[in-house]
Image (cartoon, helix red, strand yellow):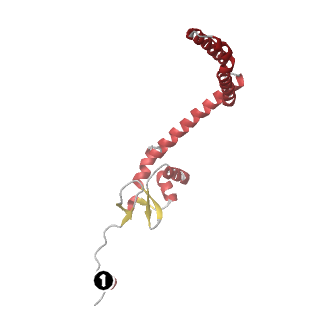
Amino acid sequence: MQKRGTEKRKAAKRGRIEPKAPKVARVRLKDLKPAALAAEEIIESQKKAAKYVGRSERTIRRWVKEGMPTAKVNGKTAYVKSMLDYFKASEGKQVTEDRKREQTAQADLKQIKAKLLEMDLKIREGKLIEREEIEKQWVQRIQIVKRGFLGMGRKLAPQLAKLKDPRKVQEIIDKEARQIILKFTKR
């Protein structure tokens, strides 16, 4: 019993093999579903792809980086003519999600840099105070209020001990609280 491969080889030697169908390369495109493309639709080198579209090899590399689908043929990168034609027609300006995100990020970065420069200018002009300085001033003001309220009992006790009228007591406490608040707001 002979194996099929052997039969085909013997038939080939005798010239009795049927004509082969056009060569089809199985490729997997990066952004498209797996497909069978005719061999004449594939360009197997970057140099030939560049010559096909009349651009440089560097341009082909840039287009691939920008998202142009490529194919793998026998483990090597190959280029699909229709994709090359598309990128040539659009000058490689295919807007991909990555490119949109990159453009948005670059625009955001420019805005942030502009705001930082504007803030730096305002700081130099004395229109902005640094955060540490503001925090320092707030701590000082809070300490004034804290000392005032904690010392209020000691300060008012002798005056309040003599009084029996609740309205007078309230009046003295309110007056002292207002003075503490005024000290807080004046600084």
Quarter of the image that includes the C terminus: top right
Residue 70 screen position, x and y as percent: 44, 57
Residue 187 shows in this picture: no
In depth, the one of 110 and 180 nearer the eye is: 180
In depth, the one of 55 and 117 nearer the eye is: 117
Left or right: where 60 falls relative to 31? right
Residue depicted at 47% across the width and 54% down the height: 52
Residue 132 screen position, x and y as percent: 68, 31
Crowding at label 1, few (<14), some or many (≥20) Cα neighbours within 10 Å? Answer: few
Q: Quadrant of residue 143?
A: top right
Residue depicted at 53% across the width and 40% down the height: 105
Residue occupied by mark 1: 4
Q: Amino acid at mark 1?
A: Arg
Left or right: where 44 falls relative to 22? right
Residue 29 screen position, x and y as percent: 40, 57
Quarter of the image that includes the N terminus: bottom left
**Dot 1: element:** helix
Is residue 139 positioned above or below 39 on the image? above
Residue 20 shows in this picture: yes
The total number of labels drawn is: 1
Left or right: where 139 falls relative to 6? right
In depth, the one of 106 and 163 nearer the eye is: 163
In depth, the one of 101 and 32 nearer the eye is: 101
Residue 78 screen position, x and y as percent: 45, 60
Is residue 144 positioned above or below 65 on the image? above
Residue depicted at 54% across the width and 54% down the height: 57
Q: Quadrant of residue 124?
A: top right
